[in-house]
Image: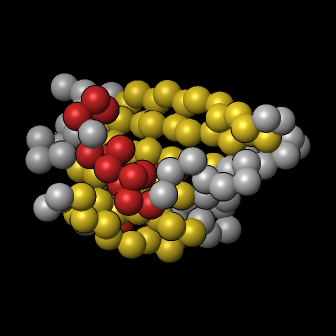
Amino acid sequence: MWSYQSSATLAQGQRMGRLAVEVHSAGSLLPADPCALARQFWGMGGTCEVVTVGTTPVGVVVRAGDDDRFDQWAAYRHPDGVVVFVAQSGKFGDGRPELTALPFPVRQLAALAVDERFHLR
């Protein structure tokens, strides 16, 4: 099994946040349930909701738990077993001012998780 990750720094004037995408190849032992899957991302837990994108259920942690490396993240397991996590944070983590708002609303974050551009085969 392989996993790939990419991240981007988000800037709004002097304010900074970040966005990360992590993809796991088919064959992982990650759970199939959308919220159980979302809570597995970096072991961060949190409060999860299932958001439907078209007819596809996506787990979205809308509020981080004690581990606040990210503010929100979405998780989706493709039918072939590939898993995609998309995470966003309003802070960069180096003491710079935070973004005034998260870059993506929850529904759009969920849509990114099912986007075929992140479905690596």
In this view of the protein, which residue sits in the foreground, 66 or 107?
107
Question: Is residue 32 something one can see in this rendering?
Answer: no
Q: Nearer the viewer, residue 8 or 46?
A: 8
Q: Locate the C terminus and report the quarter of the image it occupies.
A: top left
Residue at the outermost front position: 13
Q: Residue shown at 27%/39% (left/top)?
A: 115
Percent x, y of residue 60: 41, 62
Colouring chosen for the image of the structure:
secondary structure
11 left or right of 79?
A: right
* Residue 85 relative to residue 19: left or right: left
Residue 55 appears anywhere in the view: yes
Classify residue 24 by image quadrant.
top left
Q: How many marks?
A: 0
Residue 77 in percent (x, y) is at 23, 50
- Quadrant of residue 25 in the image? top left
Q: Position of residue 46 (x, y in %)?
A: 53, 69
Residue shown at the point (11%, 47%) measured from the top left? 79
Between 15 and 18, the residue placed more toward the observer is: 15
User: Does residue 61 appear to the left or right of 78 in the view shown?
Assistant: right
Residue at the spot x=51%, y=67% of the render?
62
Quadrant position of the N terminus in the picture: top left
- Could you tell me which residue is drawn at 48 percent across and 57 percent down? 105
Q: Is residue 81 above or below residue 3?
A: below
Relative height, residue 43 to residue 24 (above, below): below
